[in-house]
Image: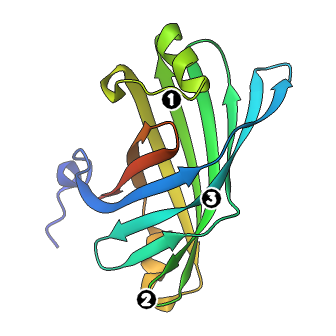
Amino acid sequence: MNADPEAALAAPRLTPFADLSVQVGAPIEVGAVGHGTRRVIPILGGTCVARDWSARVLPGGADFQLIVNERMARLEARYVLETDAGERIYVQNDAVRTAAPDVMARLVRGEPVDPARVYFRCVPRFETAAPALAWIMERVFLGSGVRRPDNVAMRFFEVM
């Protein structure tokens, strides 16, 4: 056996996995909750194009946001994808979005902003009963996002 421990510790590679476009509704403002401002953003639908399959984003999910301060929001989106074959995938996507205070204020108001001025990274996790897709529960994924007034675009990468 020729195991190279240094090779096993090399920086991981990222392989493109899926592109999503998620339509979102108007925020439901909960208000100041002691450690930030809580908002819930309804997920209305959308599309997903993955390496070997495509899906639609089912309505009924939501993005549970905590605006921590004038520069940062923590996001917890939960929703379901339904593939063209009828298989369902539960997605839990935890994200951090940061920007200069004026840019964050515009995002919170639902205004368009230059995506280059926003750090938006996520860690999606998947659950599925579909045998052909079970492998996605055994991998780590990372992603980047762009928030637009009525949708969120995300690109997910498999960590190799």
Of 128 and 140, nearer the camera is 128
Across and down, in percent, residue 60 comes to 71, 63
Q: Element type at marker 1?
A: strand
Residue identified by numbered label 1: 97
Q: CA distance from mark 3 to mark 1?
A: 21 Å
Whichever of callouts 3 and 1 sits on the residue coming sooner in the sequence is 3
Going by the image, does 68 lie left or right of 83? right
- Tags 1 and 2 touching, CB below 8 Å: no
Q: Nearer the viewer, mark 3 or mark 1?
A: 3
What is the three-letter code of the residue carrying label 1? Answer: Arg
Looking at the rendering, in which quadrant would you find the N terminus?
A: bottom left
Going by the image, does 26 lie left or right of 35? left
Across and down, in percent, residue 44 comes to 62, 58
What is the three-letter code of the residue carrying label 3? Answer: Leu
Going by the image, does 140 lie left or right of 6? right
What is the three-letter code of the residue carrying label 2? Answer: Ala
Residue identified by numbered label 3: 44
Looking at the rendering, in which quadrant would you find the C terminus?
A: bottom left
The residue depicted at 61 percent of the width and 23 percent of the height is: 109
The residue depicted at 18 percent of the width and 53 percent of the height is: 7
Q: Element type at marker 3?
A: strand
Q: CA distance from mark 3 to mark 2?
A: 27 Å
Whichever of callouts 3 and 2 sits on the residue coming sooner in the sequence is 3
**Image quadrant in which you'd find residue 31:** top right
Which numbered dot is residue 132?
Answer: 2
Whichever of callouts 1 and 2 sits on the residue coming sooner in the sequence is 1
- Tags 3 and 1 touching, CB below 8 Å: no
Q: Nearer the viewer, mark 3 or mark 2?
A: 3
